[in-house]
Amino acid sequence: MSSATLAPSNLTEEGRNRLAAIGLNQDQLPRHVAIIMDGNGRWAQERGLPRVFGHRRGIQSVRAVSEECRRLGLTQLTLYCLSVENWKRPPRELKFLMRLLRHFLVVERDELASENIRLVMIGEREGLPPDVLAEMDRTVEMTRNNTGMTLALAVNYGGRTEIAKAARRIAEKVARGELLPSDINESLFDQHLDTAGMPDPDLLIRTAGEMRVSNYLLWQISYSELWVTETNWPDFREDNLAESFHAYAGRKRKFGGLIKS
């Protein structure tokens, strides 16, 4: 679902002041930003600390970036929290990540509600601890009717898994006679993804300097602008986000066509 013609939502006075401070106009902003939050372990290891300290510090970046995106009137922020491949990590680290996610959902619940942010989850529920799923469901339900920015957490998520699951859903409908093979097109396929109803990301940010998309939103980022920073996620803050927005504002998005002169 292309979002090229859609502008960010209306700004508050606070948002207008912040835009003035970073030197951008509202129509220069992306509508939907997706972030691969990389470098937590590297940040910790560079300081001689266990990797879990990087994950804990990274939560501060989640708060700072989420608040800045809300302040600037973005429609959606999608964060890559845990991939389906991340289960290969040491059990102690995974256990800590699950506790950290559960803690975030509980502690930030009231803040999300008061800031009119709607929380959603994309990814596979199977394999996640029941207590984490319970807190996720509570927070999703509490914020369901919020009309501000959507904060999407990609948890136990993989782009290939999502695409295969959508294909299976469509195939089952064809088998039941609910769809004809000729009904299948990009729009219908989009409706069977975890992100159904969401705009495609305009900007994909990756921290820690890695030049790959790591199985993240493979369908959705077809025409996203990519921006990579050497900054590790625990050090990523509002100024880094502003830098990415300036880079985005300088891009010429053609979506496969030509730019009118």
Image (tube, grey):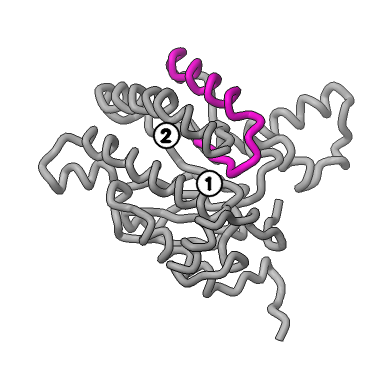
Q: What residue is shown at x 87% (from left), y 40% (from top)?
A: 183
Residue in front for this viewpoint, 27 or 153: 27
1 to the left or right of 133: right
Q: What's drawn in magenta, residue-wise? A: 128-153
Q: Earlier in the sequence, mark 2 or mark 1?
A: 1
Residue in front for this viewpoint, 184 or 54: 54
The residue that mark 2 highlights is: 82
Q: What residue is shown at x 15% (from left), y 48% (from top)?
A: 46
**In the picture shown, does residue 187 fall above or below 88?**
below
As helix, strand or loop, the secondary structure at mark 2 comes to strand
Residue extending furthest top? Answer: 130
**CA distance separating discs 2 and 1:** 15 Å
Q: Residues within 10 Å of mark 1 (few under 14, many from 20)?
A: many
Task: Indicate the position of residue 106 as horizontal and vertical percent values.
Answer: 42, 23
The picture quadrant where one finds residue 12 is bottom right
| Residue 221 visible to an observer of this rendering | no
The residue that mark 1 highlights is: 77
As helix, strand or loop, the secondary structure at mark 1 comes to strand
Is residue 197 a member of the stretch shown in magenta? no
